[in-house]
Structures are given as structure tokens and as C-alpha cells.
Amino acid sequence: MTGAGQVAGPAATVTVPTAAAMRALGTRLAGLLRAGDLVILIGDLGAGKTTLVQGIGAGLEVRGPITSPTFVIARVHPSLSGGPDLVHADAYRLTSPAEVDDLDLDDTMDSSVTVVEWGGGLAEGLAADRLEVTITAAGQGRDVQFTGYGERWSGAADSAFLALSGGLEGL
């Protein structure tokens, strides 16, 4: 499904100064997410991927704690509020899209928000509609770039993603 759906293009890049601001960004991002959404996180070790997922989990009001699933590969965090569950996967130790497919993440895609760390080049086949979030070092903080793919994200305006950053500077 990688080629399916149209690229919405880089919607926005937000500069995040601290780990607390990264969690706050994740909490705000959760407000845009719904059951069936796939989010692929891309970034180096220590970039803040798991920290962002902690914020997403807080925003979705799921059972935690949210920790890196590197060794268990995937965790399901049930909703505590009647919203979608959070499926948090880590593809760091996986080497092919076939190994991602073996996780059977597609079994819960419709009812959950699925977030895959290290999913670039591996998890795109899970859904034509997906949000890719690339985190890179930027001075003392991080640049977080949101790129939407497919019909689900084609209507996401730059302003919707940029609004996520409001007030993060002081965190």
C-alpha cells in the first residue's frame, strides 16, 4: 500500500525545546488522532520518539506507563476513557516489512491508534493513510516534521499542525 494514496506533503515543522514540550506536543497530537490512524515515527536514538508517544498516550487517556517497546516489539495500551486503544510498536529490531506484517498490527488497526517507532521503510504497507513524524536534532531542541499521506491527511492544513506548537516554547 505504500504507493496508494496521495502525498499531502510536509504539513508543518514544529520546533520543540524540551522533553516536557515533546510530551505536550504528543498530547495535542492525540486530539487529531482517531481509531484507524497509523503514525510512523522516524528519528535517531534519543530523538524523543517514545517521549512523543507518552504524550499521545496521555492525550488518548490510555493505561500506561508508556515505555519503549524495543524488546517486546509491541504493546497495547487500553483506553481508560472509551476512546481508541493505543498500539505502540517498535520496529528497531525488525529488518523487513514481512516482519512488521508478522506482528499482526492490521488486526487492531480499525479500533486503535497505531504508532510505530523506527517504522520508516517498514510499516508504510500497513495503511495508505498515515502520518509520518520525523524528529531531528535542532540546536538544543528538536524539529518535528509532520507529513500526511492519503485521503485521511490530505485535508490537514498546515495551520492544524502548526497550532500543535502553541505555547510549547516555555516548556
Image (cartoon, grey):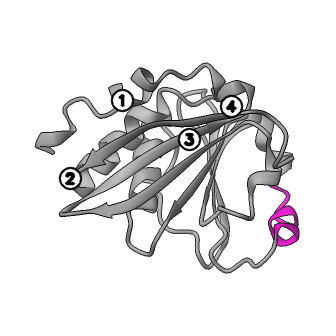
> SS class of the residue under badge 4?
loop
Q: Give the range drawn in magenta.
A: 97-105
- CA separation in Å, label 2 and label 3: 20 Å
CA separation in Å, label 1 and label 4: 22 Å
Q: Which of marks 1 and 4 is nearer the N terminus?
A: 4
Q: What residue does disc 4 label?
A: 35
Q: Residues within 10 Å of mark 4 (few under 14, many from 20)?
A: some
Q: Give the percent coordinates (x, y) of residue 4.
A: 85, 39
Where is residue 135 shown, x and y percent of the image? 42, 57
Can the viewer see residue 80 in this picture? yes
**Mark 1 or mark 2: whose residue is earlier in sequence:** 2
Distance from Cα at disc 1 to Cα at disc 2: 15 Å
The kind of secondary structure element at disc 1 is helix
Please, what secondary structure does the residue beneath circle 2 have? loop
Which of the two discs, 2 and 3, sits closer to the camera?
Answer: 3
Identify residue for label 1: 162
Identity of the amino acid at label 4?
A: Ala
Mark 1 residue type: Leu
Give whichever of discs 3 and 4 has the lower sequence position. Answer: 4
Question: Which labelled disc corresponds to residue 147?
Answer: 3
- In front: 57, or 171? 171
What residue does disc 2 label?
17
Q: What residue type is labelled 3?
A: Thr
> What secondary structure characterizes most of the magenta part?
helix
Q: Which residue is drawn at 67% across and 64% down?
A: 74
Mark 2 neighbour class, 10 Å CA radius: few under 14, some 14 to 19, many 20 or more: some
Q: Earlier in the sequence, mark 2 or mark 3?
A: 2
* CB under 8 Å between discs 1 and 2: no
Q: Quadrant of the C terminus?
A: top left
Q: Residue 103 carries which label?
A: none
Task: Using the rendered image of the protein, determine whether residue 65 is visible from the camera's viewpoint.
Answer: no
